Amino acid sequence: MNPRWLLAAVAALVAAPALAQDKKPLRWGTDPTGGAPYVYKDGNAFVGFEVELADYLAKELGRTSEMVTGDWDKLPELLGKPAGDPNGIDIVLNGYELREDLEKTYPSTVPYYVYRLGLVIHKDSAGDIAGWSDLRRAKAKGEKRSVGVLGGSAAHEYLKDEFGNAIDLKINPDVATVVGLVEEKRLDATVQDLPAATYYIKHGKDLVLGDEPRQPGYYVILTRASDKDLREQLNAAIKKGIKDGTLKTIYEKYGLWNDDQERLLYWTEQPWPPFKVAAEEGATKAGKADWGQMIGELLRAAVMTVYLAVVSFPIAMLIGLLVGLGRVYGPAWLRVPLGLYVEVLRGTPLLLQLYCVFYMLPQIDPHLALSPINAGILGLAINYSAYEAENYRAGIQSIPRGQMEAALALGMSPLTAIRVVIVPQAVRVVIPPVTNDFIALFKDTSVCSVILITELTRKYNELYNFNRDYIVQLAFVTAGLYLLMSYPMSLLARGLERRMGTNAAGGHR
């Protein structure tokens, strides 16, 4: 054996891992919570047709595939970070539809998939919803039909444009959650891109398509405007995969290949994108944004924020007062569970509590299913009741013991003494911290967006997704509305503190 050949072989084996480690990663942004068939967990590994597509593209570019997770509607923002930033990404690859507003800032590759919008309903609703047009028809009690959708998606934009206020549009960042609510008949329908619709109809319970799919569009990969070379390399790899059948093989594996995909071949030979970007025409989006409509939508969402706060907080105060009294004057068998009630609620996130109220209670008993607004009110009231209980307990304990003894000496019963003597004084003492908690509640209503309530923060996110050029202006308007709602209460709290001669910091936020 030639020793030189042997040494060369050994050197190659040693160098191979080092060369693999030296490969530049292709960092692609995705949101796994979007689920199958895009990116989802199978055991300990992520799988999905976009995972395999990313692996294929990285291989064609001589790079390694590296998945970076983030919120679906915020993935383009990760492209805004400079190349090489550990928190940034090179591309967005997660079922992002071709949109002219995004194209101006994040130029896209040629399409890698042709999608349509599918109307998904429960099979028991097939007689009531026979097609898209039936979404406009009110239900038996005159209620609008509730339709769930992924916020910021093409389906979201289509439903707003096509149906407007004729439907009760429910926004959620999790496709699986929305589909699950249709399965439970808590939503009348959901509109999803056909890959997701097809998957959940096949793997879900009693789901069917309510009509023929609509509105064909393209999935594209978003890139930085400055990454022209990377974009051209990706285009070459996608075109090659279309022509040699690699993409077809991947899509067939997940049951996604259909006649629409034949249109991909057309775009391998045509200029992309299929429209002129506004910036290239010397135009801007100025004037395209309807500020009157956007401010109107924000104001309506602010009304919902006020409603949630005004209705839920008195309930929280009442429950908190009863719990506080029970912890101070109740027997041991009552004080222990009430103490546990307070600590559990203060020690767990409001978000989790809302999930329990809205999503988990119906799993125990379908009769416990609440509407989003009722669930939001109940969840906020329960959460804040724990903090109000501590406020009232502190207020009760601040009252000198001699006052209770004097009331009893005058012949009052313990309940009468508590009601007439102790509680009025305790309520007066805790007004400042309770007022501050009410201010905090205005901001915490934003968490209710996870249970399909469109309050102020949810509406801001929705408008931002379709008006990304106006993020700063929208943020200032939204912040101003929160300030208008909370500042009067702040002034009231300060006035009460000065009048009562207290320096109560108050509140739990």
Image (cartoon, rainbow, N blue to C red):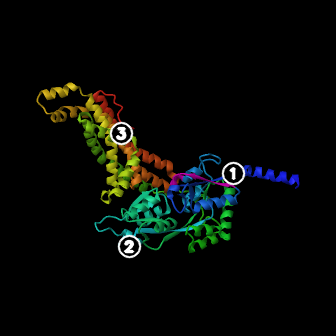
Residue 476: horizontal and vertical position, in percent?
A: 46, 46
Mark positioned earlier in the residue sequence (1 or 2) = 1
| Front in this rendered view, residue 357 or 74 | 357
Q: Tell whether label 3 touches label 2 (CB within 8 Å).
A: no
Q: Nearer the viewer, mark 3 or mark 1?
A: 3
- Real-space CA distance between mark 2 and mark 3, rounded to the nearest whole angstrom: 47 Å
Q: Which residues are magenta?
A: 63-74
- Horizontally, residue 371 falls left or right of residue 227, namely left
Q: Mark 1: which secondary structure?
A: loop
Mark 1 nearby-residue class (10 Å; few <14, some 14–19, many ≥20): some
**Disc 2 marks which amino acid?**
Ala
Type of the residue with mark 1: Lys
Residue at 65% across / 48% down in the picture?
A: 83
How far apart are the alpha carbons under marks 3 and 1?
A: 49 Å
Q: How many marks?
A: 3
Q: Disc 3 marks which amino acid? A: Glu
Q: Residue at x 63, y 67 (%)?
A: 247
Residue 24's disc number: 1
Quarter where residue 217 is shown = bottom right
Secondary element under disc 3, as helix, strand or loop, is helix
Labels 2, 3: front one: 3
* Residue 70 shown in magenta: yes
Left or right, residue 130 beside residue 19: left
Q: Please tell me the numbered disc located at residue 126.
A: 2
Q: Judge the density around disc 2: few (<14), some (14-19), many (≥20) Cα neighbours within 10 Å.
A: some
Which quadrant, please, contains the C terminus? Answer: top left
Which labelled disc corresponds to residue 343? 3
Image marks 3 and 1: residues in contact by CB distance under 8 Å: no
Q: Is residue 492 at all visible to an observer of this figure?
A: no
Where is residue 239? Give x, y as percent.
67, 66
Instruction: Note whether 83 is above or below 95 in the view shown.
Output: above
Left of 193 or right of it: where is 222?
right
